[in-house]
Image: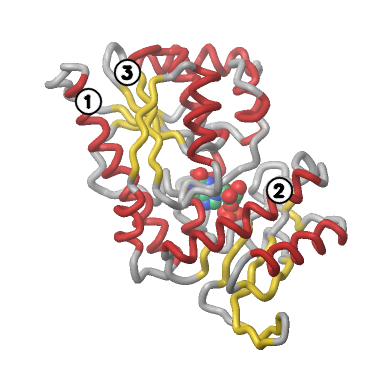
Amino acid sequence: DWTTHNVVEEQIASIRAQVGTKRAICGLSGGVDSAVAAALVQKAIGDQLTCVYVDHGLMRKGETEQVEKDFVAATGVQLKVVDAQERFLNALAGVSDPEEKRKIIGREFIRVFEQAQAEIVAEAGAEGEDVAFLVQGTLYPDVVESGGGTGTANIKSHHNVGGLPDDIEFELVEPLRQLFKDEVRMVGQELGLPEEIVQRQPFPGPGLGIRIVGEVTKERLDLLRDADAIAREELTAAGLDRDIWQCPVVLLADVRSVGVQGDGRTYGHPIVLRPVSSEDAMTADWTRMPYDVLAKISTRITNEVADVNRVVLDVTSKPPGTIEWE
Ligand code: XMP
């Protein structure tokens, strides 16, 4: 019988069987999947788990603080925060190919986890542990779209599946690998996680790195962070959070168009709004959003974000478009 209660019980037993008395780390991203995976593993092995939050500089405004505060408050989990902004920016310098970006981000995540694991083991005085376990919130659709399912094309390398480096030494613990997002949310509820975490809209592990079409730089990230914060603020103010599956905000960094502002010509970048409605992210439709909300977002972004002089709406379903642009 498929009930969330049974899924939780089964996964707890299998996590205990896999990890035994050893230590595990779990990468937290701020999203639903890793939060639920972490809560499940914590329930199974308690203090043997340490969560690691990698601040890769590709996060949205306020996200890092939210993880540090909300998730720890909700679960009491042990958390290690790693500032890896320089490391990711350096690794991404000069790269604009989407798959290359995804592979670099996936690889750097693992390198940071390896370092964190070594530090955690040393701090615990547990040298000599032969296996290092890494918990990931991989879902069924991540596996399918990365080409891990049977007979499926490789669409894009999700950071925690196809984006992993070949020389990975971790043994993976992936308790959500057979679940869809709505099921993960139900498991999160069963585990007693608060609504703010369980109902959060999806956000990809590679973060804003795959929402900048072109090279990723600090300046471009700051610009996109500002535009994204405005869009989120207005969507929330309009009460649309629960109606929209997610709304990627994308910077076309390599495109410029002519505009006019005040009494001068501008030559700035477009920002794309990509609101979608979906059940499981495998297919999606573009959301018919109220025009007045779109107008407000557009006016605010062009007024408040320097170097952006145009806001466009993506009216493509999935397929043929994917939800993220890269
Ligand atoms: P696409 O762009 O493939 O996205 O239509 C489907 C869903 O997956 C999210 N996404 C990711 N999530 N790591 C993640 O954790 C990734 O590398 C990744 N790539 C896409 C995307 O936001 C959407 O919800």
Closer to the chain start, of discs 1 and 3, is 3
Residue picked out by circle 3: 19
Quadrant location of residue 99?
Answer: bottom left
Closest to the observer, 123 or 139 = 123
In the drawing, what numbered circle is on residue 131? 1
**Residue 198 picture location, percent across and down:** 63, 29
In the drawing, what numbered circle is on residue 227? none
**Residue 60 picture location, percent across and down:** 54, 49
Q: CA distance from mark 1 to mark 3?
A: 9 Å
Residue 44 visible from this viewpoint: yes
- Rate crowding at label 2 as few (under 14), some (14 to 19) or many (20 or more) other CA atoms within 10 Å: few
Residue type at mark 1?
Answer: Val
Residue 151 visible from this viewpoint: no
Closest to the observer, 56 or 138 = 56
Residue picked out by circle 2: 233
Query: Mark 2 or 3, which is nearer the eye?
Result: 2
- Rate crowding at label 1 as few (under 14), some (14 to 19) or many (20 or more) other CA atoms within 10 Å: few
